[in-house]
Amino acid sequence: METKYIFVTGGVVSSLGKGIATSSIGLLLKSYGLKVTLQKIDPYINVDPGTMNPYQHGEVFVTEDGAECDLDLGHYERFLNNSLGRENNITTGQIYYSVISRERRGEYLGKTVQVIPHITDEIKSRIKQLASKNNIDVVITEIGGTVGDIEGQPFLEAARQMRLDYGKENTLYIHLTLVPFIKAAREFKTKPTQHSVRKLREMGIQPDILLCRSDSWLTSDERQKISLFCNVPINAVIDAVDVECIYEIPLIFRQQKLDQMILKELQIEKQDPDLTEWELFVQKAKSPSKVTEIAICGKYVELRDAYKSIIEALSHAAVANDARLKMKWIDTDRIEDEIALENALGMVNGILVPGGFGMRGVEGKVRIVKYAREMNKPFLGICLGLQCLVIEYARNVCGMKGANSTEFDDETAYPVIDLLPEQKKITNMGGTMRLGNWPCRLEARSLARKIYAKDIIEERHRHRYEVNPKYIKALTSKGLVFSGKSPKGKLMEIAEIPNHPFYIGTQFHPEFTSRPLAPNPIFYHFIKSSLEII
């Protein structure tokens, strides 16, 4: 079968859920036995989001090959249950960097380098390479931002040209747009959608299918109006309604026969789809018998997207444990004394300290780690969470007064967390951390070994600082167990303490490998432990 190309665009406002819609369509097509991959285009000039503040962009998702990517790559992996790579995320910065480099090498033979055809050709080349590299049946490319954005125009033009290159039977345009409900008028307003589609048509793209984002189901009259003014068949006007569980979206799309419509438009022979396991997962997610409350203690809590994969990993683990997840968000910058600690954490069933950069809120995290250790609260520390675990243990158990990371205090007497020698030589900040999959050897008879039930694991990393080898002996002599290490034993990957319900820290990010149908083992056992102390 010739590769099919689907383009998902958005209009009116950002954050409508193009990533979830794209992931849902991918899952539906995969259920027919098709080989599907998803790709995100980000129109910003940054080469990747790795140096961007989480408040600017939300979470930075890391692929197994070490690419720092848009958070939608996390949705893609979770819905498809496939690991993606750096070629699945394109940015304006990457495209222009590549074209300019080629121009400097003289590869354009003296021609004037222009947006059309050189930039658009580079964009199309990356889309086609993704398909050919993995023998893909369907490539679904999500174009970030909204129609009308200046920075998105080259990508829309490239998408337009793809139909000229491959024909209507091999290309499909799906547009996600907002249909707001105006309470004062007590009706849905279709004008924003009409304007959005008009703008898209000005770019030369007539959408084949509209996904209408709204609070509730549209009436037949509203769908008819959208169909008429947007030049789209009424059966191609699909409701994308708000739901409590995002994993229900594919089932809602399937209910409206979106999958069958796509197969028909792309002339793909139908097979019998299989979404049985997914349907069971959604059913379990909507009717749990237990409840657990987890405190997420971080410094970016005002923007929940900064912890998107952690939220989803906790949710997967909760469903697997037949529990409803309640999350309590704790700003570690505001934890200043014992009273604040008890008020914030006294009633929760588990405590999670996620990763982060910079010293703001770190002392609050260290206090929270100490509280979890002393009060026997199930605790999971991730990346910086592990480093805070080590700092706290060094200070309060090993007597190393003022122990710290050199990231926060380069004059500390006890630099228990420090840069590795190779990191000290680095000057460029982008893409130079310890990134992607790294192996970890688990110690026998440890909690980590029990959790994973294997000797060697691979998990994804994103950090510069490590546990300082100079202090390993002093820390372990006082009872701290480094139960996961790099194969040669140089790098400390997991720390835990015995005689505690659950107290573990990981230098890696286990949230990146959690899936709805296969929760990450550490998250599963963390939630299981939190339920056991209720």
Image (tube, helix red, strand yellow):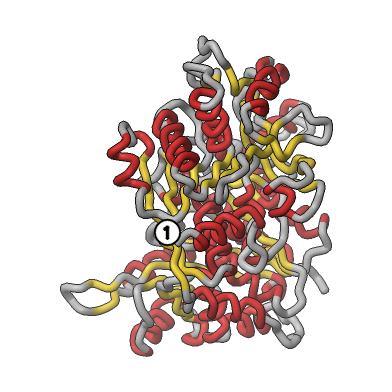
Report whether 55 appears left or right of 36.
left
Q: Is residue 51 shown above or below 184? A: above
Q: Secondary structure at mark 1?
A: strand
Residue at the extreme left of the image, as rendered = 184
Q: Position of residue 245 (x, y in %)?
A: 47, 71
> In the shown orientation, is residue 360 left or right of residue 173?
left
- Badge 1 is on which residue? 293
Q: Quadrant of residue 15?
A: bottom left
Split into 4 quadrants, where in the image is the C terminus?
Answer: bottom left
Residue kind at label 1, given as amino acid type:
Glu
Examine the rendering and report whether any part of residue 213 can be seen. Answer: yes
Residue 116 can be seen, yes or no = no
Estimate the x, y position of residue 428 in percent, counting from the top left: 63, 22
Q: Residue 408, relative to residue 455: is it above or below?
A: above
Q: Position of residue 249 (x, y in %)?
A: 52, 74
Q: Nearer the viewer, residue 494 or 87?
A: 494
Q: Position of residue 24 (x, y in %)?
A: 58, 70
Dot 1 alpha-carbon crowd within 10 angstroms: few under 14, some 14 to 19, many 20 or more:
many
Q: Residue at x 55, y 51 (%)?
A: 501
The N terminus: image quadrant:
bottom right
